[in-house]
Image (cartoon, grey):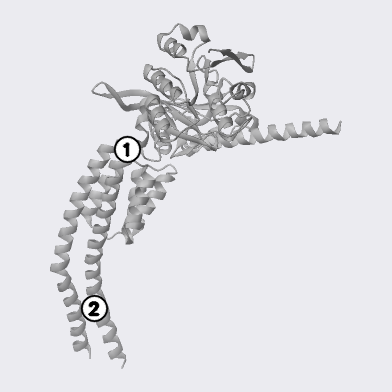
Amino acid sequence: MIRMVGAVLLAAGSCALGLSAVGHLEGRVRDLRDLVAGLEVMERELAWRLPPLPELLERAAQATGGHAAQFFRLCAQGAGHLNGRAFRQVWTQGEEASGLRLEGTDRLLLEQLGAVLGRYDGDSQRQALAGAVERLEQQRLQAQAQRQRLGRVYGTLGIAAGALLIILLV
Amino acid sequence: MEAGMRQEALGRGAAAARARGRIEAVRQAAAVLPDRLARAVLALEGDELERAEEVRLRLGRPVTVNLGGEEWAAGGGPVTEEDLRQVLENASQASAHTVLDQVRNGYVTLRGGHRLGLCGTVARHRGEITTLRYLTSLALRVACPVEGQAGDLLDRMRGGEGVRSTLILAPPGAGKTTLLRELVRCLSDGVGGPPLRVGLADERGEVAALWQGRPQFDVGRHTDVLDGCGKAEGLTILLRGMNPQVLAADEITHPADVRAMEEAAGCGVALLATAHAAGVDDLRRRPVYRALLDSGVFRQAAVLERRGTVRQARVEVLS
C-alpha cells in the first residue's frame, strides 16, 4: 500500500514538473504579449500628451493584466517616490518583484529600455519604446513557436515519466 | 481692554500659523534633496528654518541655506554630481521630457510652487538650447504665498463700473508677480465685489505654478489657468475658449502681447498685467510699451514702491 502511494506521488510529481515547464512557456508568451501591449500604450501616450512617467506607467498598468500590470504599477509607484534611487533601479526592482516570466534576452531588452525612460526628450523615449516593442514582439513570436514545439514534448515527457515510474515501482 | 487682548492673541495665533506654514513649506521643498542633504538642511533650528528662503547646491561645495539674505553652510559634506542629478530626477519625477521646456528657461516648478533654478553647461542643437549637459549649481527657492497684499489697489480696480484695466509696474524683484496673483485671487473669489471669471495666461508658470495640472498657489475659485504657451497665444485662446471677464498676464514684453491685449480690450474684457519699469515715464521711453500706453487699453498703472520693508502701490490714471 505504501509502495503504491509512493509511486502515485512520484508519478504526480513527474507530471507536475512536465506541466510546470509547459506553464512557464505559456506564461512567458502571455507576459511578453502584455508587456508589448503596455509599452505600446506608453508609446502612444508619449507621442500625444507627454505625461510624466508615473502617469504613463499607470496607464500601461491599466491597459494590461497579470504580471505585466503588476510590473508597470510597481514602476509607477517607484517613479513617484524615488527615495534616492535612480529610475533605472526602480525599473529593475519592479521587474524582479513582479514575477514576470522572462528569459535572458527579454530581460536585457527591458533593462536597456529602463536606462532610457525618463532621461531624455519625448521623441528619444518614443523611439526607444518603439524599438523595444518591435524586439519584444519578435521575442514573443519566438516564445510562441517554442511553446508549440516544446510544450507538447514537456507535457508528454512528464506524463510518460510518471506512468513509467508507476509501472516500475508497483 | 479685553477686546484688545483678544486681538493680540489672534495676532499671535496668526503669526504662529504663518511660521508653521513656512516651516512646512521648507520641509516640502527639501523633499527633492537626497536624504543626506535634506537632513542637513532640516537640522536648522525652528526659527531659522522659518527664515529659510533658498537652498543652494554647488558642485564640490557644502549645501547652503539662504536665511534672510545670508548664506549659511549646512552639513552633509560636499555636493556631488550624483546629488545634483538626483535632485533633478526627483524634481521631475523621473520624467525629463515633462520639464525640458522649463530646463531651457533655467528653472523647474515643483509641487507646492517651489522653484528649482538650474545652472551648468548648456547643450545646443541647431542654435537652440536643448538641455543642460552638465549641472553645476541648483537653487531651490521656497515658495511663500503672501495674502492680504491687494488692499487699496483692489478697491481702485473695483471702483465704479466693472473692473478698471490695470498695469502693475515695478523693477525686477519688487513683488509684481505676488501682487498680480493676489489681485487675481481677490477678483476671482469675489473679495470687495462680485466674483469674476479670470483667465490667466501664465506663460512661465510663475503666477499659479501649475504642477501636474493643479495650481500650487491659490489663484481663486473662478480662475482658468493656461500655461506652457506664449502670452499672446494664451490670451487669445483664453479669450476664445473661456469667456473671461478679466484677463491676466505676467510681464508684457513683446509687441505680440500688446496686440493680444488690444484685441481682448476690444472684446470688453478687463485686463491685468505687469511690466518691468520704474514708473509710467520709464515705460513710455520704450517703444513696445509706448504703443501699449497709446492704445489706451489700460486705464491705470499701479507703480510698486518699497519704503523700508513696506511695499506700496501708487496708482496713476492713464486714460
- Chain letter of the residue beneath label 2 in the structure image: A
Residue B107, quarter of picture: top left
The residue that mark 2 highlights is A15
Q: Residue A119, which numbered label?
A: 1
Look at the numbered disc 1 and give the secondary structure of its residue.
loop
Q: B145 or B279, which lies in front?
A: B279
Q: A139 or A157, which lies in front?
A: A139
Q: Residue B146, which numbered label?
A: none
Identify which amino acid the numbered label 2 is placed on.
Answer: Cys
Identify which amino acid the numbered label 1 is placed on.
Answer: Arg
Q: Is residue B316 left or right of residue A83?
A: right
Residue A46, quarter of picture: top left
Residue B279 placement (x, y as % from top left): 53, 10
Q: Quadrant of the N terminus of chain B?
A: top right
Please report the residue visible at 44 percent of the width from the left and 19 percent of the height from the top: B252
Look at the numbered disc 2 and give the secondary structure of its residue.
helix
- Density class for disc 2 (Cα within 10 Å; few <14, some 14-19, many ≥20) is many
